[in-house]
């Protein structure tokens, strides 16, 4: 099965993605990460108003196999978190790039994403 990596997103080598909408970054985890984790059973995310810092953990995703830190691709303030996915974390697998998003963050500096990977680069890294 070939996994999808939408071209309009930026990716991190730690398997988070970012969708940009002006200064708002929607953060989630890639289809590859979801597949590697297996059945996701628990999600811990920061509260709205919290500050996240690029490269640092902002929460955890727990599956039947492992607990993984979620790394923030940007520095900024959490403006929204996906309450539906916190309540039903297994649904991330259904639509990781749509309804399965995790956080929306108002970025301090969009230039922080200059070192992020394109879909092509990310795909080559995880499937190469």
Image: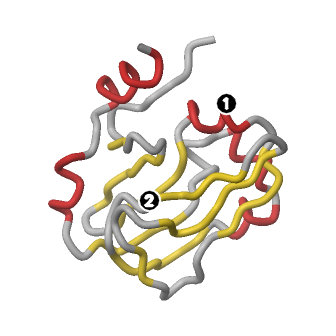
SS assignment at label 2: strand
**In this view, which residue lies farthest toward the bottom?**
49
Left or right: residue 60 compared with residue 6: right
Task: Look at mark 1 in the image and give the residue it sits on.
Answer: 35
Q: Name the quadrant containing residue 64.
A: top right
**Sequence order check: which comes first, mark 2 or mark 1?**
2
Residue 113 drawn at (x, y percent): 23, 54
Q: Estimate the spatial distance between the alpha carbons at disc 2 and disc 1, rounded to whole Å.
A: 20 Å
**Front-most of 122 and 69?**
69
Its colouring scheme is secondary structure
Residue shown at 76%/47% (left/top)? 91
Badge count? 2
Up the image or down, 94 lies above or below 113; here it is above
> Residue 54's x, y, as percent?
34, 66
Q: Is residue 40 above or below residue 123?
A: below
Residue positioned 28% across, 33% down in the render: 118
The part of the image, by quadrant, that contains residue 117 is top left
Whether residue 53 is situated above or below residue 117 in the rendered picture: below
Q: Nearer the viewer, residue 51 or 79?
A: 51
Q: For label 1, count other residues whose C-alpha is less than 10 Å away and answer few (under 14), some (14-19) or many (20+).
A: few
From the viewer's perspective, is residue 63 above or below residue 83? above
Q: Residue at x 52, y 65 (%)?
A: 103
- In the rendering, at what x and y percent does residue 92 appear? 69, 46
**Quadrant position of the N terminus in the picture:** top right
Contact check, label 2 and label 1, Cβ < 8 Å:
no
**Residue at the spot x=32%, y=59% of the render?**
21
Tell me: 121 left or right of 97.
left
* Picture disc at residue 45: none
- Residue wearing tag 2: 26
Question: On the rendered image, what quadrant is the C terminus found in?
Answer: top left
């Amino acid at each position: 099965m070939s996994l999808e990596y939408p071209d309009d997103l930026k990716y991190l080598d730690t398997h988070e993605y970012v969708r940009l909408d002006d200064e708002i970054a929607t953060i989630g985890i890639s289809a590859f990460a979801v597949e590697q984790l297996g059945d996701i059973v628990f999600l811990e995310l920061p509260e709205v108003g919290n500050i996240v810092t690029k490269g640092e953990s902002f929460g955890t995703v727990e599956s039947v196999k492992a607990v993984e830190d979620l790394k923030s691709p940007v520095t900024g303030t959490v403006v929204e978190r996906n309450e539906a996915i916190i309540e039903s974390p297994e649904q991330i697998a259904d639509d990781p790039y749509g309804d399965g998003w995790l956080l929306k963050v108002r970025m301090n500096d969009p230039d922080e994403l200059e070192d992020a990977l394109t879909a092509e680069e990310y795909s080559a890294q995880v499937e190469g």
